[in-house]
């Protein structure tokens, strides 16, 4: 009885503790309710799956992929054929089908009950089953006796209905196989919208049969055929992911004018070559709307989703200002300015979309009281516009704070909640208009080789923010689970961890990359728009993108671990020997690295620029070891020495080769700490 009481108390505590999970299950995103039990269900070669209730081809393909994935994950050749035995290892029960074209707000919930004799996954529709199967895969672990899943009861549903990832294929074309593996990654973390940014000034990426000069003049030959797009949309649908296309209007559309210059507000000529970011459609001419109508008619059939994104961002109006006819139109229609003209354009656009049965979405610049409330507003310039849109009656979603191209750490994205800031004080009805958010992968600095590492694993932290209860906030727990998820994602074919290794070989032109890797592991690309701002030629993103900055990860795990070890060491009053040992090992490796790396840096033209960075790392290693020696001897470091080291640190803070050394800040802390006596913990 006592044991029962203790067990049920433990279960109660564990189920309350979803906010800071105590159960130790490496699930990401964290389900809304997890009740751990005792024991486990073996996953061995006899593992079988049976389906009861509703079934359709989407569900069957989902189960097929699940078994294939489990086979790959375990190296066992599991039976693909659904079991009809009365006692399958996993029983799947679905009540009804999903919509043929997946809809925003469909029920995605599921319940997964695992006990020692079998597991049962139930959901109203296949959408929930797909999510539950991903949870099951994350639960499979290696034990002393074989593979197993723990006994557990999980009840789960998303917090937000719109959990998206934007991928920009305009600036740099991304092949479909790369996009497909990213869809697999999205499905693994329960994201359900791919926002496909299909063209921008630098390239138009969709085959139009009606207006073939769009892809012919508007791209470098790299675009998706309509057959490929249909196949891709079906691939996404199979994984519970909606594909929302974005066709930028009226700005960001130079590539469109390469084939159809008559749509632009200025004389041109237009090409996809750099220059001319002012290019914008002429909203005053009937011809423009005729073109848009025919174009949207064609694209609306190709992209079955209810939603259609029209961009609408960053119209600087220079071409409108410079065109007397457009200015005359503004005055004749009683408009005050270019914003009013864009609102007029958006109103006409919205009517065309509505005629083709699409709901219009736009970036937050489209927000204007003249627009119907059906329009969805995507906030990117700040969180205020999200709240304002919701207050005014528009559905809105958040991307500000989720820009993966800014190279922020996962923890910073993770801390951004759609219902925070200005949105926190909205009333419940207004809050309910905030339908979710989207991570954004803008592709100015992206190649097919590095894109996975720019999206993953950080995107999983955003996926959790959008799926899990708002109380799930602990960054320590997030990083632990992200670490586990990260290598599981590579099993799906993503290359966010492995791509750096092959790229380092190319940079070095040789087999021995140990010293180069030591440097690569502690640097990160410069943040925010620093790289953009340092461009010598404005808005030329053609590359080549083959430098160290193009391959190192946006977030250095090693620098984070170093910071954690240092915190543990300082927090222990300098008595934590294990932490000190780890710190010393790293510092010594950094100290000695420059001598090993230097010959390589001279051999490869791609590496010359790294010499000052490599020297800085060695200098930091020396300084850190001396600081530790002072602390070990309980002898305060001399002030003049500290001043000298802090000056070196200042130098090391400056970006070099568009890279930042991520161990400078913790070392500064160590050097400053060496001034004082040992403290008691
Ligand atoms: C944007 O980043 N211009 C939407």
Image (spheres, helix red, strand yellow):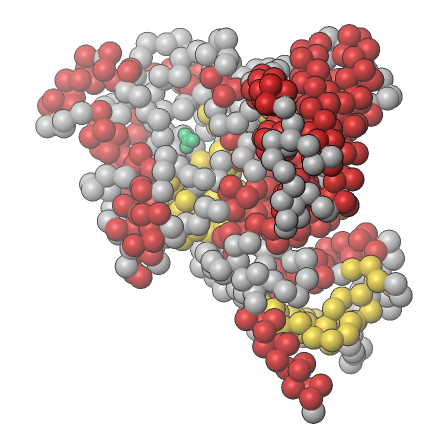
Where residue 96 appears, x then y in whole percent? 55, 70
Based on the displayed image, in which of its 4 quarters is residue 47 positioned? bottom right
Q: Nearer the viewer, residue 453 or 87?
A: 453
Q: Is residue 395 above or below residue 666?
A: below
Q: Nearer the viewer, residue 460 or 334?
A: 460
Residue depicted at 52% across the width and 54% down the height: 473
Q: Quadrant of the N terminus?
A: bottom right
Based on the displayed image, in which of its 4 quarters is residue 227 positioned? top right
Where residue 603 appears, x then y in whole percent? 80, 8
Determine if residue 226 is in view.
yes
Q: Nearer the viewer, residue 604 or 656?
A: 656
Based on the displayed image, in which of its 4 quarters is residue 229 positioned? top right
Judged left or right of residue 241, residue 314 is left
User: How many badges with numbers are in the image?
Assistant: 0
Residue depicted at 68% across the width and 32% down the height: 635
Judged left or right of residue 616, residue 197 is left
Q: Is residue 284 above or below residue 97?
A: above
Residue depicted at 14% across the width and 17% down the height: 328
Determine if residue 307 is in view.
no
Residue depicted at 74% across the width and 35% down the height: 633
Looking at the rendering, the quadrant in which ligand 1 lies is top left
Q: Is residue 189 above or below residue 111?
A: above
Where residue 66 appears, x then y in whole percent? 73, 58
Where residue 132 appears, x then y in whole percent? 63, 63
């Amino acid at each position: 009885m006592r044991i029962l009481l203790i067990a049920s108390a433990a279960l109660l505590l564990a189920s309350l503790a979803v906010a800071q999970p105590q159960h130790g299950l490496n699930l990401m995103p964290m389900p809304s309710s997890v009740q751990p039990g005792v024991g486990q269900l073996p996953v061995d070669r006899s593992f079988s799956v049976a389906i009861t209730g509703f079934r359709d081809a989407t569900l069957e393909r989902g189960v097929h992929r699940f078994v294939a994935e489990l086979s790959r994950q375990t190296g066992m050749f599991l039976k693909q054929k659904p079991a009809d035995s009365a006692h399958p290892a996993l029983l799947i029960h679905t009540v009804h089908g999903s919509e043929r074209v997946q809809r925003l707000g469909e029920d995605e919930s599921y319940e997964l009950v695992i006990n020692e004799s079998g597991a049962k996954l139930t959901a109203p529709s296949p959408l929930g089953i797909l999510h539950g199967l991903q949870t099951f895969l994350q639960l499979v672990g290696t034990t002393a006796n074989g593979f197993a899943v723990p006994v557990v009861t999980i009840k789960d549903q998303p917090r937000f209905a719109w959990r998206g990832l934007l991928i920009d294929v305009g600036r740099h074309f991304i092949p479909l196989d790369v996009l497909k593996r990213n869809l697999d990654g999205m499905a693994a973390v329960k994201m359900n919208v791919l926002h496909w940014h299909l063209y921008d000034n630098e390239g138009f990426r969709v085959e139009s049969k009606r207006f073939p000069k769009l892809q012919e003049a508007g791209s470098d030959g790299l675009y998706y055929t309509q057959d490929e797009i249909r196949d891709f949309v079906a691939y996404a649908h199979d994984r519970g992911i909606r594909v929302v296309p974005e066709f930028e209007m009226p700005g960001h559309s130079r590539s469109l004018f390469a084939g159809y210059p008559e749509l632009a507000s200025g004389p041109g000529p237009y090409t996809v070559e750099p220059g001319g970011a002012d290019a914008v459609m002429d909203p005053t001419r009937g011809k423009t709307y005729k073109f848009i109508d025919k174009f949207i008619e064609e694209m609306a059939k190709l992209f079955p989703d209810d939603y259609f994104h029209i961009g609408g961002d960053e119209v600087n109006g220079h071409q409108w200002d410079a065109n007397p006819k457009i200015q005359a139109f503004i005055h004749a229609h009683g408009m005050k300015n270019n914003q009013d003209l864009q609102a007029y354009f958006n109103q006409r656009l919205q009517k065309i979309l509505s005629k083709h049965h699409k709901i219009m979405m736009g970036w937050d610049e489209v927000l204007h009281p003249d627009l119907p409330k059906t329009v969805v507003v995507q906030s990117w310039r700040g969180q205020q516009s999200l709240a304002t849109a919701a207050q005014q009656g528009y559905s809105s979603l958040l991307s500000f704070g989720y820009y993966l191209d800014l190279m922020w750490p996962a923890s910073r994205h993770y801390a951004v909640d759609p219902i925070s800031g200005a949105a926190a004080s909205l009333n419940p009805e207004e809050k309910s208009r905030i339908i979710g958010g989207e991570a954004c992968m803008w592709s100015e600095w992206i190649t097919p080789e590095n894109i996975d590492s720019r999206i993953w694993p950080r995107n999983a932290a955003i996926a959790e923010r959008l799926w899990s209860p708002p109380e799930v906030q602990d960054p320590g727990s997030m990083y632990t689970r992200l670490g586990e998820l990260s290598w599981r994602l590579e099993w799906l074919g993503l290359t966010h961890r492995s791509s750096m290794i092959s790229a380092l070989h190319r940079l070095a032109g040789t087999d021995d990359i140990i010293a180069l890797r030591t440097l690569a592991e502690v640097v990160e690309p410069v943040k925010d728009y620093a790289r953009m701002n340092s461009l010598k030629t404005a808005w030329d993103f053609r590359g080549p993108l083959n430098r160290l900055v193009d391959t190192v990860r946006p977030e250095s795990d090693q620098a984070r671990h170093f910071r954690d070890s240092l915190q543990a060491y300082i927090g222990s009053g300098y008595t934590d020997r294990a932490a000190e040992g780890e710190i010393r090992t790293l510092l010594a490796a950094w100290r000695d690295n420059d001598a090993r790396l230097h010959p390589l840096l001279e051999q490869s033209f791609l590496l010359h620029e790294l010499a000052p960075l490599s020297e800085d790392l060695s200098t930091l290693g020396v300084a850190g070891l001396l600081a530790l020696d002072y602390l070990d001897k309980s002898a305060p470091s001399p002030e003049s020495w500290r001043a000298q080291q802090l000056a070196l640190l200042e130098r090391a803070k400056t970006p070099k080769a568009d890279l930042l050394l991520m161990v400078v800040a913790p070392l500064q802390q160590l050097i400053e700490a060496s001034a004082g006596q040992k403290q008691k913990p």
